[in-house]
């Protein structure tokens, strides 16, 4: 799916948001329905650590808000979504540009809504890899996102 003008403008705005801009990462693609996001994290003076590879904090920060943002946009105002926990496993030093791809299938949205009809809350676990140019995994991030129906929605 190609980006619409609206999703392109939202991507640009997010990339300019100071907290994300400072990570050194950039969203390179944002699907109009917020079901796919692609991120690029280059090795640069802003992301380089003491030993000359990509700083682990930059790796984590590059991917941190994506699943929460995707769920907020797809579930709508009747749901509260926030990050509950995260972990990162470093596998290889980042010596070049890393990329991550986030996908949120329709079945996941349906399952969350169905679960919240019977339970007050649900925690969802998502995993994303930061991958180098040759397809090698440099870091794996696992996020736990908490979802519940908004109190205002009744």
Image (spheres, rainbow, N blue to C red):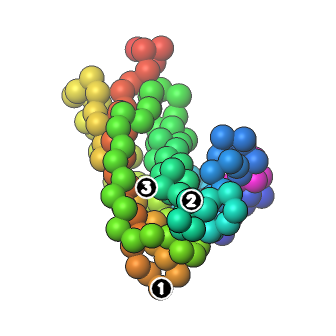
Decide which of tag 1 and tag 2 comes sooner along the chain: 2
**Secondary structure of the residue carrying numbered label 1:** loop
Q: Is residue 141 magenta?
A: no
Task: Please give the label number shown on residue 49.
Answer: 2
Q: x and y percent of residue 28 in the render?
A: 65, 64
Q: Residues within 10 Å of mark 3 (few under 14, many from 20)?
A: some
Front-lying residue, 85 or 36? 85
Q: Could you tell me which quadrant the C terminus lies in?
A: top left
Q: Which residue is mark 3?
A: 104
Is label 2 in a helix, a strand or a loop?
A: loop
| Count of marks placed on residues | 3
Residue range corresponding to the magenta coloring: 9-13
| Residue in front for this viewpoint, 103 or 101 | 101
Q: Which residue is label 1 attached to?
A: 134
- Residue at x-position 57% and y-position 68%: 52
Measured Cα–Cα span from mark 2 to mark 3: 32 Å
């Amino acid at each position: 799916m190609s980006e619409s003008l609206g999703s392109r403008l939202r991507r640009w705005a997010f990339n300019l948001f100071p907290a994300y801009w400072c990570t050194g990462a950039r969203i390179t693609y944002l699907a109009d329905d917020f079901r796919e996001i692609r991120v690029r994290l280059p090795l640069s003076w802003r992301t380089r650590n003491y030993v000359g590879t990509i700083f682990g904090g930059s790796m984590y920060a590059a991917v941190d808000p994506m699943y929460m943002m995707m769920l907020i946009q797809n579930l709508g105002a009747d749901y509260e979504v926030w990050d509950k926990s995260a972990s990162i496993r470093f596998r290889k030093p980042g010596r070049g540009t890393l990329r991550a791809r986030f996908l949120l299938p329709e079945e996941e949205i349906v399952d969350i809504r169905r679960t919240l009809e019977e339970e007050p809350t649900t925690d969802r676990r998502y995993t994303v890899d930061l991958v180098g140019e040759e397809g090698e995994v440099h870091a794996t991030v696992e996020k736990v996102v908490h979802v519940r129906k908004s109190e205002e929605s009744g």
